Image (cartoon, rainbow, N blue to C red):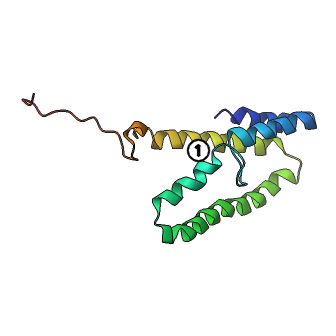
Amino acid sequence: MAGIPFVLLMGMADSLLLAAVSYFFVLVLIGSIFPTLGMVDPVYQLFPMELVEPAERGTANGVIHAFKEFPMAIGSAVAGFFLAPNLWLPTFWIAAICYAASFVIYLLYFKGFDVRAGAAAPSVAVSEPKGAA
């Protein structure tokens, strides 16, 4: 969530230098659509490959990238409605809201997972049966 203020700052920047610096921090802190940019992209690309069989990794990678590219095609058409009349700022507010929503959904989904257990399993409090000691 540290990159969200930079998304808004990029939209409100009054100089190219401020916009460029903000864009850099957005890439570093949130990541981007391009491979090898952003801190989360290597994990994003590696994690699904560990979940599928080696023979299925090519297909899985293709599906992942198809779902990654499809929203950009729709987003370009939607962005045209804002950018044609020179309404730049709403696009950055919408992006910031979408980023914040994705972080909240991620946190809520993984809230019950215990990363110290060494496996991707929900953490469950195990209590001993009564009388066992």
Q: Is residue 98 above or below residue 17?
A: below
- The outermost residue toward the right is 15
Q: Reply above or below: 13 against 87.
A: above
In which image quadrant can residue 5 be found? top right
- Residue lying farthest front? 54
Point 84% across, 44% down: residue: 88
Residue 3, x across and y down, in percent: 70, 36
Left of 128 or right of it: where is 40?
right
Q: Position of residue 106 (x, y in %)?
A: 52, 43
For the C terminus, the image quarter is top left
Place of residue 117 in the rendered image (x, y in percent of width and height, measured from the top left): 37, 40
User: For this view, does 18 lie left or right of residue 39?
Assistant: right
Relative depth, front residue between 112 and 24: 24
Secondary structure of the residue carrying numbered label 1: helix
Q: Amino acid at mark 1?
A: Ser
Q: Which residue is mark 1?
A: 102
Q: In the rendered view of the protein, which quadrant contains the N terminus?
A: top right
Few, some or many C-alpha atoms within 10 Å of disc 1 (few <14, some 14-19, many ≥20)?
A: few
